[in-house]
Every structure is written in structure tokens, then in C-alpha cells.
Image (cartoon, grey):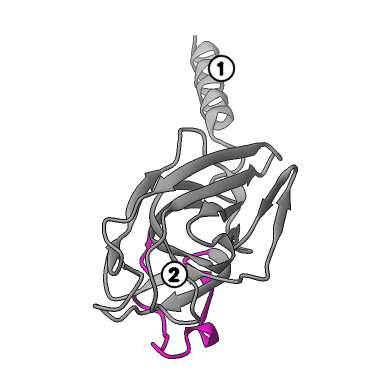
Amino acid sequence: MQFLQVLSLVASASAFVASDPLEKRADIQYNDSFDDLATTIVLPQLFPVGLYNGLSYGGVVVLRPIDGVASVLPHSPPQHGGAAGPLDLLYLGDLTLNTFATLTRGNTVKSFDLQDFYWGFGTDTGTTFGLAQPGTIYVVGYTVSGQELTTTFSYVPDSTFNARLTFAQLPAGWVDLQNVTFAVANSEPISERTYIALDNVRHINHV
């Protein structure tokens, strides 16, 4: 009888150990507002975002628009991220995309889930001065297993200057990502002179 009780306890303990995941990971939520990063109004090109909250922002600088003469305004003032570069071209299959920004997991992040973000288009003048521009943003992501995910969002500014950013929520399935690219698919009047404004980029890092 005691032998059966001991055997039962051993079996229960084995089942408990087997159910415990071999690789534990922590999930950390972030809301990238760019407000805690250094920049200047005159030369934002000197202040790239770089590694921020576990993810590396490629081609993105920290912008602090001047209220009254800015293309677009941050969703959460005083700053937002901005990607510009009229000479940059990104080739994805049959698509040729102009300005683009990349979001890549850092060395301490196994993967990340992209949830939503605020965005808009402005005129690339080297500063935040300019006109808001309507257009479409193309977003492509790759999971750690190599699966490609794509989606697009449209932007219609609510004013010529000081336009508000619009909200974009990623479809279900944008999880376990290794990198994401945001690119100008089209904009008016000139796609090559468009910059992408990003703010409040929400993501979950798996570390």
C-alpha cells in the first residue's frame, strides 16, 4: 500500500515537471512615445532613435515639431519618431517603396508582437516644417520562423498643417516577430519627399 502511494506521488511529480515549459520567457509591454529621447528642433537628423525599449529603429530620428508650422503633430506631445530619406529605395518583389523605417529585435529580445501605432505623412524638408500629405503606408513583418506578414493603412490628414496622426491596429497574427518595415507605398503630391511620422508604437517583447 505504501509502495503504491509512493509510486503515485512520483508519477504526480513527474507529470508536474513535464508540464513545466523547457524554455521560460517573460513578456514586457512597451509604448514607444519617443518623448524621453534627446533631439533638437533645428537638426533632428543628428538624433537617431537607435535601440529603444529593446527594439532597434532603423532610419528613424527623434522629431519635436513646432506647433503652428508642422506637417503633423505627435499623438503624445512633445515628440514623435520620423523616417525620411528621398534617396532611399526599398524593393519588395514588384514593389518599389520610397521612404521606409525598420524595427528589429535587439540582442536581448527573442521576438516581439507589434500591436498598434499612430502614424501620418508629412513633407520631408529636413525639419518638421511642411504640409501634411495623404497616402498609404505599407507594413511588412517577418516572424522568427520566416513567415511574411503584410498589411496597408491609409492616411487622410485632417488639416494642411498640424495634422493629427491616425491610429493603426495590426491584424491578429503579428506575433513572434524578428523585424518589421514601415514604407511609403504612395502619397501626394510627391512620394519621394514624404516622411513617415510614428508615435506610441505599442509592442510586447519576449525576452
Residue receiving disc 2: 81
Helix or strand or loop: what does disc 1 sit on? Answer: helix
In the image, which disc is placed on residue 38?
none
The quarter of the picture where residue 76 lies is: bottom left
Nearest the eye: 125 or 112: 125
Looking at the image, residue 152 sits to the left or right of residue 33; the answer is right
Nearest the eye: 46 or 175: 46
Label 2 CA crowd tier, 10 Å (few <14, some 14–19, many 20+)? many
- Magenta residues span 30-54
Looking at the image, residue 19 sits to the left or right of residue 131; the answer is right
Pick out the residue farthest to the left: 68
Nearest the eye: 112 or 7: 112
In the image, which disc is placed on residue 7?
1
Per the model, the C-alpha gap separating discs 1 and 2 is 61 Å
Q: Which residue is drawn at 33% across and 52% down?
A: 166
Determine if the magenta segment contains residue 61: no
Q: Which residue is drawn at 57% across and 26% down?
A: 14
Q: Label 2 sits on what residue type?
A: Gly
Q: Label 1 sits on what residue type?
A: Leu
Q: Position of residue 127 (x, y in %)?
A: 44, 82
Determine if the magenta segment contains residue 40: yes
Helix or strand or loop: what does disc 2 sit on? Answer: strand
